[in-house]
Amino acid sequence: MLRKPSTVSSFPKIPEERFAEFHAAFKGGDSWWQVCADCGGECEKHKVGSLMPGEKEFIARSLGLSAASLEDRYLDRVVTPLGNVDVLKLKPGCPFLDADCRCSIRSVKVVLCDAYPIAFEVEGDAVRFFLDPECPISRNRDATRYYEKVAIPALRKLNAAVGWYRAVALYDSLDIDYERLDAGRGDLLTYQSFSLEQLRAAAVETPNPKSQ
Ligand code: SF4
Protein backbone atom coordinates (compact mmCIF):
# COMPACT_ATOMS: atom_id res chain seq x y z
CA MET A 1 0.00 0.00 0.00
CA LEU A 2 1.30 3.48 -0.84
CA ARG A 3 1.98 5.94 1.93
CA LYS A 4 -0.57 8.72 1.93
CA PRO A 5 1.06 12.14 2.26
CA SER A 6 0.04 14.21 5.26
CA THR A 7 -2.48 16.92 4.39
CA VAL A 8 -2.45 18.65 7.76
CA SER A 9 0.49 20.56 9.12
CA SER A 10 2.26 18.77 11.92
CA PHE A 11 2.89 20.03 15.42
CA PRO A 12 6.20 21.61 16.43
CA LYS A 13 8.68 18.84 17.21
CA ILE A 14 10.09 18.50 20.69
CA PRO A 15 13.91 18.38 20.59
CA GLU A 16 15.29 14.86 21.06
CA GLU A 17 17.37 15.83 24.09
CA ARG A 18 14.19 16.71 25.96
CA PHE A 19 12.94 13.14 25.59
CA ALA A 20 16.28 11.91 26.95
CA GLU A 21 15.87 14.29 29.91
CA PHE A 22 12.35 12.95 30.53
CA HIS A 23 13.57 9.36 30.69
CA ALA A 24 16.52 10.30 32.90
CA ALA A 25 14.21 12.08 35.34
CA PHE A 26 11.32 9.62 35.41
CA LYS A 27 11.68 5.85 35.65
CA GLY A 28 8.23 4.72 34.64
CA GLY A 29 6.22 1.97 36.21
CA ASP A 30 8.78 -0.82 36.61
CA SER A 31 8.46 -0.63 40.38
CA TRP A 32 4.77 -1.36 40.04
CA TRP A 33 5.08 -3.97 37.33
CA GLN A 34 3.42 -6.61 39.55
CA VAL A 35 0.30 -4.42 39.69
CA CYS A 36 0.26 -4.44 35.89
CA ALA A 37 0.85 -8.18 35.76
CA ASP A 38 -2.06 -8.74 38.19
CA CYS A 39 -4.21 -6.37 36.15
CA GLY A 40 -3.32 -8.29 32.99
CA GLY A 41 -2.34 -5.24 30.96
CA GLU A 42 -5.89 -3.89 30.71
CA CYS A 43 -4.79 -0.48 29.43
CA GLU A 44 -2.96 -2.15 26.54
CA LYS A 45 -6.02 -3.87 25.16
CA HIS A 46 -8.24 -1.07 23.91
CA LYS A 47 -6.36 2.20 24.21
CA VAL A 48 -4.42 4.18 21.62
CA GLY A 49 -0.78 4.96 22.44
CA SER A 50 0.09 8.40 21.07
CA LEU A 51 3.61 9.65 20.36
CA MET A 52 4.52 13.26 21.01
CA PRO A 53 5.78 15.36 18.09
CA GLY A 54 9.45 14.46 17.61
CA GLU A 55 9.19 11.28 19.69
CA LYS A 56 9.19 9.05 16.62
CA GLU A 57 12.57 10.42 15.56
CA PHE A 58 13.93 10.07 19.12
CA ILE A 59 12.82 6.44 19.46
CA ALA A 60 13.95 5.51 15.95
CA ARG A 61 17.44 6.90 16.51
CA SER A 62 17.69 5.23 19.92
CA LEU A 63 16.76 1.85 18.39
CA GLY A 64 19.06 2.32 15.39
CA LEU A 65 16.17 2.42 12.94
CA SER A 66 15.17 4.92 10.30
CA ALA A 67 11.95 6.83 11.04
CA ALA A 68 10.33 5.11 8.04
CA SER A 69 11.31 1.68 9.33
CA LEU A 70 9.92 2.47 12.80
CA GLU A 71 6.71 3.68 11.17
CA ASP A 72 6.24 0.55 9.11
CA ARG A 73 7.01 -1.89 11.91
CA TYR A 74 5.46 -0.21 14.91
CA LEU A 75 3.33 2.83 14.08
CA ASP A 76 0.18 4.12 12.42
CA ARG A 77 -1.17 7.64 12.19
CA VAL A 78 -4.44 9.20 13.33
CA VAL A 79 -5.65 12.02 11.10
CA THR A 80 -7.54 14.68 13.05
CA PRO A 81 -8.83 18.11 12.01
CA LEU A 82 -6.21 19.60 14.35
CA GLY A 83 -3.24 17.71 12.94
CA ASN A 84 -1.91 14.19 12.50
CA VAL A 85 -0.65 12.14 15.41
CA ASP A 86 1.68 9.14 15.29
CA VAL A 87 0.33 6.25 17.35
CA LEU A 88 1.47 2.76 18.27
CA LYS A 89 0.24 0.32 15.66
CA LEU A 90 -3.53 0.07 15.86
CA LYS A 91 -3.73 -3.65 16.41
CA PRO A 92 -4.54 -5.99 19.31
CA GLY A 93 -1.72 -5.67 21.86
CA CYS A 94 1.10 -3.15 21.94
CA PRO A 95 3.85 -4.03 19.42
CA PHE A 96 6.49 -3.38 22.10
CA LEU A 97 4.90 -5.42 24.90
CA ASP A 98 6.51 -8.75 25.80
CA ALA A 99 4.76 -11.85 27.13
CA ASP A 100 5.34 -10.72 30.75
CA CYS A 101 3.45 -7.44 30.22
CA ARG A 102 6.77 -5.56 30.18
CA CYS A 103 7.68 -2.89 27.67
CA SER A 104 10.61 -4.08 25.53
CA ILE A 105 11.88 -0.52 24.90
CA ARG A 106 11.80 0.66 28.52
CA SER A 107 14.62 3.21 28.26
CA VAL A 108 12.76 5.07 25.48
CA LYS A 109 9.19 3.95 26.22
CA VAL A 110 6.52 6.11 24.61
CA VAL A 111 6.10 9.02 27.03
CA LEU A 112 2.33 8.87 27.50
CA CYS A 113 2.51 5.09 28.07
CA ASP A 114 5.44 5.50 30.45
CA ALA A 115 3.69 8.19 32.46
CA TYR A 116 0.35 6.33 32.65
CA PRO A 117 -1.67 6.33 34.96
CA ILE A 118 -1.01 10.04 34.56
CA ALA A 119 -3.72 11.18 32.16
CA PHE A 120 -4.52 14.66 30.92
CA GLU A 121 -7.30 16.98 29.93
CA VAL A 122 -7.18 20.32 28.14
CA GLU A 123 -8.88 23.25 29.87
CA GLY A 124 -8.81 26.33 27.67
CA ASP A 125 -5.14 26.80 26.81
CA ALA A 126 -3.87 24.76 29.72
CA VAL A 127 -3.16 21.04 30.05
CA ARG A 128 -4.12 19.48 33.37
CA PHE A 129 -2.49 16.22 34.41
CA PHE A 130 -4.12 13.83 36.87
CA LEU A 131 -3.99 10.22 38.00
CA ASP A 132 -6.47 8.07 36.11
CA PRO A 133 -8.67 6.51 38.81
CA GLU A 134 -9.40 3.53 36.54
CA CYS A 135 -5.83 2.23 36.81
CA PRO A 136 -5.06 0.07 39.89
CA ILE A 137 -1.67 1.83 40.24
CA SER A 138 -3.61 4.97 41.18
CA ARG A 139 -4.69 3.17 44.34
CA ASN A 140 -1.09 2.69 45.50
CA ARG A 141 0.00 5.57 47.74
CA ASP A 142 3.76 5.30 47.03
CA ALA A 143 3.09 5.18 43.33
CA THR A 144 0.77 8.16 43.28
CA ARG A 145 3.27 10.21 45.29
CA TYR A 146 6.04 9.35 42.81
CA TYR A 147 3.94 10.01 39.73
CA GLU A 148 2.70 13.33 41.05
CA LYS A 149 6.13 14.50 42.20
CA VAL A 150 8.20 13.23 39.28
CA ALA A 151 6.08 12.30 36.27
CA ILE A 152 3.92 15.42 36.10
CA PRO A 153 6.84 17.90 36.30
CA ALA A 154 8.76 15.80 33.73
CA LEU A 155 5.74 15.89 31.41
CA ARG A 156 5.45 19.65 31.82
CA LYS A 157 9.14 20.06 31.00
CA LEU A 158 8.63 18.30 27.68
CA ASN A 159 6.33 21.17 26.83
CA ALA A 160 4.37 19.46 24.04
CA ALA A 161 2.09 21.88 22.19
CA VAL A 162 -1.40 22.34 23.66
CA GLY A 163 -2.73 21.77 20.13
CA TRP A 164 -1.18 18.31 20.12
CA TYR A 165 -2.89 17.45 23.44
CA ARG A 166 -6.14 18.78 21.97
CA ALA A 167 -5.77 16.51 18.92
CA VAL A 168 -5.05 13.46 21.11
CA ALA A 169 -8.03 14.29 23.35
CA LEU A 170 -10.30 13.82 20.32
CA TYR A 171 -9.80 10.03 20.52
CA ASP A 172 -7.94 9.34 23.76
CA SER A 173 -11.00 8.36 25.77
CA LEU A 174 -12.15 5.81 23.18
CA ASP A 175 -11.83 2.10 23.87
CA ILE A 176 -11.06 0.52 20.53
CA ASP A 177 -12.01 -2.97 19.43
CA TYR A 178 -8.88 -3.64 17.42
CA GLU A 179 -10.29 -6.74 15.79
CA ARG A 180 -13.03 -4.56 14.34
CA LEU A 181 -10.63 -1.82 13.30
CA ASP A 182 -8.24 -4.34 11.77
CA ALA A 183 -10.91 -5.71 9.48
CA GLY A 184 -10.38 -2.86 7.05
CA ARG A 185 -6.61 -2.59 7.12
CA GLY A 186 -4.09 -4.09 4.75
CA ASP A 187 -0.91 -5.68 6.02
CA LEU A 188 0.47 -4.91 9.46
CA LEU A 189 3.87 -3.91 8.14
CA THR A 190 2.74 -0.65 6.61
CA TYR A 191 2.36 2.71 8.30
CA GLN A 192 -1.31 3.50 7.76
CA SER A 193 -3.57 6.48 8.35
CA PHE A 194 -6.84 6.16 10.26
CA SER A 195 -9.52 8.81 10.57
CA LEU A 196 -11.37 9.77 13.73
CA GLU A 197 -14.48 8.32 12.14
CA GLN A 198 -12.79 4.93 11.75
CA LEU A 199 -11.70 4.98 15.39
CA ARG A 200 -15.16 6.00 16.58
CA ALA A 201 -16.80 3.26 14.51
CA ALA A 202 -14.53 0.69 16.19
CA ALA A 203 -15.06 2.03 19.72
CA VAL A 204 -16.67 -0.17 22.38
CA GLU A 205 -17.71 0.03 26.01
CA THR A 206 -15.22 -1.80 28.23
CA PRO A 207 -15.24 -2.59 31.94
CA ASN A 208 -12.76 -0.77 34.19
CA PRO A 209 -9.43 -2.48 34.90
CA LYS A 210 -9.73 -4.87 37.80
CA SER A 211 -9.17 -3.61 41.32
CA GLN A 212 -6.25 -5.09 43.24
S1 SF4 B 1 -4.34 -0.32 33.70
FE1 SF4 B 1 -2.72 0.35 35.15
S2 SF4 B 1 -2.21 -1.53 36.31
FE2 SF4 B 1 -3.34 -2.17 34.48
S3 SF4 B 1 -1.69 -2.62 32.97
FE3 SF4 B 1 -2.34 -0.49 32.66
S4 SF4 B 1 -0.88 0.72 33.88
FE4 SF4 B 1 -0.77 -1.39 34.62
Image (cartoon, rainbow, N blue to C red):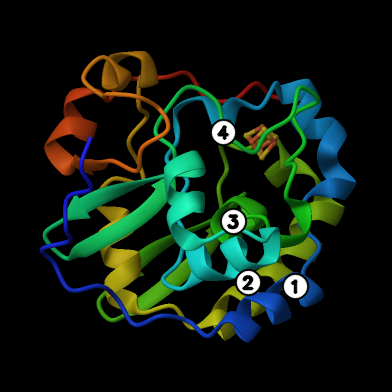
Is 24 displayed left or right of 119 in the figure? right
Is 202 or 95 nearer to us in this picture?
95
Between disc 2 and disc 4, whose residue precedes? 4
Residue 152 numbered tag: 2
For the residues marked 2 and 3, what is the alpha-carbon distance in whole angstroms? 15 Å
Mark nearer the N terminus (3 vs 1): 3
Residue type beneath disc 4? Cys
- Could you say which quadrant of the image residue 140 lies in? top right
Q: Which mark is residue 150?
A: 1
- Residue placed under numbered mark 4 in the picture: 94
Distance from the alpha carbon under mark 1 to that under mark 2: 6 Å
Question: In this rendering, does residue 123 appear at all?
Answer: no
Q: Tell me, yes or no, whether the two marked residues, 4 and 1, touch with CB atoms within 8 Å.
A: no
Q: Residue drawn at (21%, 19%), measured in percent from left and top? A: 184
The residue indicated by pointer 3 is 110
Tag 4 secondary structure: loop
Query: Label 1 crowding class (10 Å Cα cut-off): few <14, some 14-19, many 20+?
Result: some
Q: Disc 2 marks which amino acid? A: Ile
Frontmost of labels 3 and 1 is 3
> Picture coordinates of residue 138 (x, y %)?
69, 45
Secondary structure beneath disc 1? helix
Q: Say which amino acid is labelled 3.
A: Val
Examine the rendered structure and indicate whether residue 150 appears above or below residue 203.
Answer: below
Left or right of 1 in this view: 44: right
Observer-nearest of 200 and 63: 63
Q: Find the distance from the CA under tag 2 to the CA under tag 4.
A: 24 Å
